[in-house]
Amino acid sequence: MTSSDTGTLTEQFRKLVTIAGCRHHFPLLRQYVNGKPLVYFDNAATSQKPQAVIDAMMRYYEEENSNIHRGVHSLSERATQSYEGVRHKVRAFLNAGDHREIVFVRGTTEAINLVAHCYGRAFVREGDEILISGMEHHSNIVPWQILCEERNAKLRVIPITDAGELDMDVYPSLLTERTRIVAVTHVSNALGTVNPIGEVIRQAHARGIPVLVDGAQAVPHMHVDVQELDCDFYAFSAHKMFGPTGVGVLYGKRRWLEAMPPYQGGGDMIKSVTFEKTTYNDVPYKFEAGTPNIGGGIGLGAALDYLHELNMDAIRQFEDELLAYATEQILTVPGVRIIGTAREKAGVLSFVMEGIHPHDIGTILDVEGVAIRTGHHCAQPVMQRFGIPATARASFAFYNTKEEVDAFIKALSKVREVLG
Amino acid sequence: MSALKELYQQVILDHNKTPRNFRKMEDATRSVDGYNPLCGDHYTVYVKLDGERIADVSFQGAGCAISKASASVMTSLVKSKTVEEVEELFGQFHRLVKGEIEGEEEVERLGKLAAFAGVSEFPARVKCASLAWHTLHTALKSEEKTISTE
């Protein structure tokens, strides 16, 4: 082992220790629910916010609030700089080549709708095909269905295996001359599967087809490099990665963004307006009509700073251990079956209990202070694929602990006690 | 634990495990699908009417213990009642799970329905308890073929 290896290992160890100690940065977690210490295992729905994010947003409203891109006054200039500074932070976070490839939106849902709307209008014609997968969230299904209906195009679906992985044997045969875009999730919100997104992109590109990646469940858990992936679009929400609700990001390769028509019309997305002719603004502003969620954007910037300090690779390693521990422990509970047993997973443990509906599990766990999600997780086709109406889902973040997993398992063993 | 015991009473656990009138009805006068889109609960309620009177009622579908037990108790209570009587019962049930019926005596007067009094402590579960009732109400009162709690 060379001295530089030792140095890296020490650094890695230091980061892991840092992660274990950062729980106290999240004020919400210090509370009792139904008389029990809160165990928050609903991170795939939304994550909690560190004090740094809350402070940054409060400071913005207390000291900087004004409209951006317009005022000649100092306050507006400061707000513009802070907000545009976040665009550069997002660029660095995703390792995008150019900050103009970062479009601010309301969240992943709007990002996908934007692409379906604008890319779809420009490039999808009657008889064309859109390819998604069987494990998509409704937000990566419905916008494409709407487009297909409007254009008389066809929605095709990559099947998933019993383990909850993309069927990569079938995938190549679904890439046809008519395929105009492939839209797949990086990490499944219902199953936790980490998809071989690099390979998905490579095969689509070999046939000249662009790829949109739904990154909502990936960015809180792992390092993402859009240039390395070579994806054409990448979408995510701030609120699932420790930032506020109501703000998200669409990364798009510049050549696509340039070739797409605007999304909504309004202020900020134009260069000049007359009743005869309007000239649109440059990218990304062409897609950002109206006053954006400035305070939310500032919060996103603070979340990115926070994650940068912690290091995404260390977060991944810490969470992998937590998920492995939870997986091992849950299988000791009689009658539990895990839904989604992919080789590579991140952050999500979906399960069912024989003879007991997930809703009843959710209520009993809540009484014990354990917050999980139950239901179809906005992924009804996934439930249909596994022949179940719903699952119970525990989803993790780096501030969760093994002690919380123990409390969760203990609460789970009470379910049969109550329901007999 | 006591709130949980109130919610999952023996009557509810029993009806969940062995639901009554849990079958498809081939000669139903009306059948309506009831969905809770938030959780995926789904039941079909079948009614056979003899004039204004419910000659037979049954249900099928899948959902949580609360929704299934509620559907089961409902079918066993409304059989041979008139449409008007059923509507009256639905009103009482609704007030009960919303916590609007006060006093033990008042609650006890509701008979088997009283088992659902504990639901009012769990606002997230009120929709589970009411799904079958809303579906039956639709079957009796309108032309709709499906209803949703949202």
Image (cartoon, rainbow, N blue to C red):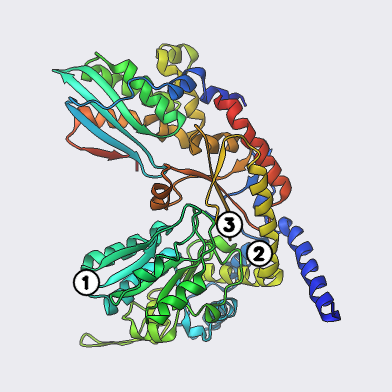
Amino acid on which disc 3 is placed: Ser
| Residue A258 seen by the camera | yes
Location of residue A266 in the rendering, given as x and y in whole percent from the top left corner: 33, 76
- Depth check: give the residue in front, A81 or A413: A413
- Residue A169, percent across and down? 43, 65
Q: Secondary structure at mark 2?
A: helix
A269 and B145: which is toward the camera: B145
Marks 2 and 3, the one that precedes in the sequence = 3
For the residues labelled 2 and 3, the Cα–Cα distance comes to: 16 Å
Q: Amino acid at mark 1?
A: Gly
Q: Are marks 2 and 3 in contact (CB under 8 Å)?
A: no
Residue beneath disc 1? A127
- The quarter of the displayed image where residue A158 is located: bottom left
Q: Nearer the viewer, residue A287 or A211?
A: A211
Q: Identify the disc placed on residue A47.
A: 3
Distance from the alpha carbon under mark 1 to that under mark 3? 41 Å
Residue at the far left in the pictured view = B51
- The mark nearer the N terminus, 1 or 3, is 3
Side (left or right) of A61 relative to B29: right
Q: Is residue A147 above or below residue B43?
A: below
Left or right, A186 with reference to A264: right
Q: Is residue A333 above or below residue A240?
A: above
At 34% from the left and 24% from the top, the residue drawn is B22
Q: Which residue is mark 2?
A: A316
Instruction: Determine whether, in the image, residue B48 is placed left or right of residue A289.
Output: left
Res. A251 visible in picture? no
